[in-house]
Every structure is written in C-alpha cells, then in structure tokens.
Amino acid sequence: MASPSRVVFKSSKTYCSAAAAASSSSASSSLSTSSSSSSSSPLSRASMKKILAKARKLEENNNGDADQAEMEGFLVDYSLKFMKCIPDQVLTDADYNDHFGVVVFRLCPSNSCSDEEGCTSGYADFAVDVGTYVEAFMEDQQDNMNWDDKFDGEMFGQCVEYEDDDNGETGYYIGPGCTEDGTGVRMAVFEDKYCYQVSETSFETISNGWSLPYTEGGVVSTKCLACMDNDGAVRDMCLDLYDVSPYRCETDFDFDHYYYDNNFEIYRYGKDKTGCTKIEVMQSTKKKAAHGAVWQDLIISVMLLITAAGGFALYTVWWRKQKENLERIDDDDDDESGYHQQDDASNGDGEHDDGELVRNPSDVYQEMEDNKVEGTMA
C-alpha cells in the first residue's frame, strides 16, 4: 500500500480560500462539473513526470520521436470524457502503489463526443486512480484558465492529514472520492490515511465551522474536454493521463503505437488491449452491485406483499368465525325471548288471553286418580 502524502492542511482558511479560487475560475471556464468517488494518495506530479519520461524514452528507443509526434497529431482530433468513478476498486500504479478509487475516462473523436454519453465508436477507455485524475485536471485548469500562481491544485488530488490551527492533529484526512452515484468526484473527510473509509464526522465539526468545498461533487468536469488547447497544441492533461494509465482498452481505437505488455513483460506494437478485461470487470462489479440491490429490493417487496396477503387471509377467516359466533348468539337470544313471551302470555289462573283453559299435568293426573276411586266405589 502506498504511503499517504505528508502534506498537512494546517489551516482551513488557506484550503477553503484556495477552493474558492478554483471554484470561481472553474465557473468562468464554463465547464460543467459533477461528482465522483473516493481515492487514496495519488501519484505526485514528480512521479508522474518521471513515468512520462520513461514512457517517452521508450518511444525514442523505438523511433519514438516520430511516434510521439504522430500520437500528438492523433490526439488533436480527440476529446477526453470522464465516464465514471468507482469507489470500491483498488488500482495499482506503475510504481506498484495501491490506490482506492478508480476513474474510467474515454478518449472520443471530438466530432462525436457527447457531454452526456461520450461516444460509441472510435474510442479507447482508460483507468487511473481518482487522485491522479483530479491532480491532472486541476493542473490543466491552472495552466489554461490563468489561475492564481499561488493556487496549489495538488492538494485536491492528495489524501492528506488535516490539522486544526488551534488543536493540531485531528486524526482525520481530507481527499477526493467518488460521489454516491459514481458520476463525479467530491471532496470528503476520511477516517484513514488512504482516504478509503468516509467519516461520519463533518468537516465543519473539525474545522470550527468552516465548510469543505465540493462535498456534493464537481471537483472535475464531466463534459467533453478537447485535447487541443487554444494554441493548437495537445493539452498535457490528455498526454499525461494517456501515458500514466495502468489500464488501457484500445480495441476500437484507430491508433497503433509501441506499448509494454505487463502480462508477458514484452514490448509490442499495435493497439494496447491489456487493460480491457480489468476495466470491464471494474465496471461490471458496480453494475452487479446495483443490479443486486434492485433484486434485493424486489425480493423484500414481494415478501412484504406475501406477508400482507397472508395476514389479510387470516383476518378474513377470523372475522368469518366471529360473525358465525355472533349469529349463533343472536339465534339463542331469539329462542329464549320466545320462551319468556309464552310465559308472559299465560295469566295466573292458567288461562290464555283468549280464555282457553290451560290444564296442568299434575291436575289431570289427580283427576284421573279421583275418577278411578269413584269407579271402584260404584
């Protein structure tokens, strides 16, 4: 794992004022921005230049002057398009340092590059860590938008420890990371020195009320960025990111060049396809996670629906039984009421209201006994 940068935010005022300058200049450049994912310590600018020097030296050893000029001439007609930010991926750079968070960007023909979708033909996909992408973007904006020379764009691309002016070390780190939807890059507070675990503690809490810029995204532009600058030259951002990308997928790219195949540790000439599988896996992992979340929500919804239906069925049976019991009680009440009504209809003399004599069985029996006695005497 790469060691984190030891640059320290000693003053929230300095950091926020620098961010304000960046935000103001970015607005004047009319570049729309969006959010992205979390990252760890990126390549420093010195390391990037070192890698580029090695890459260009390789090209010089293989008639590289001509190839370099050809590549620059080729990229003039292309635009760089931010595609997505993947927070839960680890990327190993050329120095074998690991970084959390990956940005996938695409080089599209400028005449077919869409700010929303990018392009669907004649393109190549590349993957770099979030910090490297942010740093390259900030330096490009500083070079091309006439930002203040005192502005240090590198701080936006690094995972650095935050120190309060009064209390010193806070144990928190500030760095770039992916937005929740993966469509842009944001700044966030992290718990660890690799800027992997986002903290639940807000920046305002550790900075005495100061606000951290770009917490909702917008650190980098997500629109098509032409690789040709206003002077007709190729932007360093396109060249640098092209050269330092550890994963490339140039299957549909109309450009052949020398490249190093890490899989077989040999130099080849043609289209670099060594990163196609890795880039596809990184992107599909996020798609599968999103797809899995959809299925999980669907399963939960179905279970709730089944539970509700089962509960309604049980309630229906219960209520039907209750209704039957109530009807049975009503019938019993009606029978008892009729019995009492019959008693009430009889008067004390054993007669109905209509005058009909109601004979008591005991009286009848006594009469029969009396008649039997009289018959014997006769």
Image: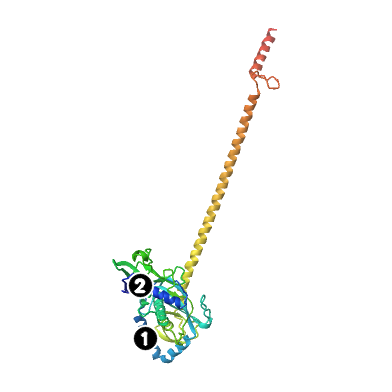
In this picture, is 277 found above or below 373? below
Residue at 60% x, 33% y is 333
Residues under numbered marks 1 and 2 in contact, where contact means CB atoms less than 8 Å apart: no
10 Å crowding of disc 1: few (<14), some (14-19), many (20+): few
With 207 as the anchor, is 144 left or right in this view?
right
Q: Residue 108: horizontal and vertical position, in percent?
A: 50, 81
> Looking at this view, is 365 or 341 the one in front?
341
**Residue corresponding to mark 2:** 15
> Looking at this view, is 24 or 192 the one in front?
24
Quarter holding residue 209: bottom left
Outermost residue toward the top?
378
**Can residue 88 be seen in this snapshot?**
no
Q: Secondary structure at mark 1?
A: helix
Q: Residue 289: horizontal and vertical position, in percent?
A: 47, 67
10 Å crowding of disc 2: few (<14), some (14-19), many (20+): some
Residue at 53% x, 83% y is 111
For the C terminus, which image quadrant? Answer: top right
**Residue corresponding to mark 1:** 53
Quarter holding residue 24: bottom left
With 261 as the anchor, is 352 left or right in this view?
right
With 121 as the anchor, is 38 left or right in this view?
left
> Looking at this view, is 286 or 44 the one in front?
44
> Looking at this view, is 285 or 30 the one in front?
30
Residue at 66% x, 10% y is 373
